[in-house]
Image (cartoon, helix red, strand yellow):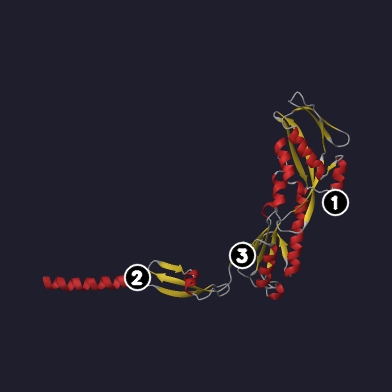
Amino acid sequence: MSEFNARDAGHLIKEAVEAAGELTHVTTLEINDPRDGTPALVVVSSNGVHTLDPGTFDKYRLAPMERAGTAKWTTLESFIEHTNRFKVDSASAVFARDDMATAKLTTIFDYHQGVADGGDRANLRHRAEYAFPFSDQWKAWHGKDKEPMAMSDFAQFLEDRIVDIDADGVPSSDEAKAFVAAINGKMASPSKLIELARGLQVYENSVLKEARNLSSGEGQLTFESTHVDADGKPLNIPNLFMITIPVFARSPDYFRLLARLRYRKAPGGVVFWYELWRADLAFEQAFAAACDQVKEQTGLPLFVGAAEA
């Protein structure tokens, strides 16, 4: 009986080993896409058929099979130089996002080729980007646009940014001239704004007595001093001033923007603010100039919008 059991056990062990071998047996096969014949590797095992990720082989390569990745540049000049280094005239293109909040240029080096070149498709994985950085002047003025400020804060802001005020004060477009005429605009010079800022600081602790608009386009505030030995004085306030600033950082191009000076009586005194008139027009002009520079210096087509993902 024991001899029979030994033979039986040996037979069972042999079958178990063979079965385990069959269960762990793995093979690879190559299959082809019936549409264009593209080959793909699959793994066949007891668990079924699974595709093999091509990226599995990447870490064993001495060099990548293709260029990929996105270079991000902080100057327009570097973006253009990099584009010229890797561009393929028949298969590269530049895309421009014209949203003021997220303005950006993107070169896709391996973009679709033209019909004349066979219309081959590409991977769209090798790119260069340039996100437009706004100038410090633009960020300062745009950041305070339409924001009410106390007299002392407004005076300090004017003194800090006085170098941006345009001394000429002449509108640069017919639309701007029409706007100035429509509101009976009285333009303030830098010296007038300094005078206004210092006057506001003088009257910081005074009480507003009267506020009215004059036919000249100026406003007039009369303050009553809290000190009994001081006399209240009228303070004439222009309703317009002009700034000349670059839209983008490191740009040599400056643009004139109209600013409408506003004020109102508030519980704590008088609050001041300004409203930039059509700042979007300056952005559009600066953005268009940069796009023209890229087209001229790279020779590539430029499309306004977004490319395929």
Question: Which amino acid type corresponds to the residue marked 1 in the rendered image?
Answer: Ser
Q: Nearer the viewer, mark 2 or mark 1?
A: 1
Question: Which amino acid type corresponds to the residue marked 3 in the rendered image?
Answer: Ala
Image coords of residue 279 (percent x, y): 76, 49
Which one is in front, 116 or 288? 288
Badge 2 is on which residue?
A: 24
Secondary element at tag 2 = helix
Left or right of 34 on screen, residue 259: right
Which one is in front, 190 or 29? 190
Q: Residues within 10 Å of mark 1 (few under 14, many from 20)?
A: few
- Seen as rendered, the residue at the extreme left is 1
First in sequence: mark 1 vs mark 3: 3
Left or right of 306 on screen, residue 239: right
Quadrant holding the C terminus? bottom right
Badge 1 is on which residue?
A: 173
Image coords of residue 149 (percent x, y): 70, 37
Badge 3 is on which residue?
A: 71
User: Residue 14, relative to residue 132: is it above or below?
Assistant: below
Q: How crowded is mark 3: few (under 14 residues within 10 Å), some or many (20 or more)?
A: some
Secondary element at tag 3 = strand
Quadrant holding the N terminus? bottom left
Which one is in front, 255 or 167? 167
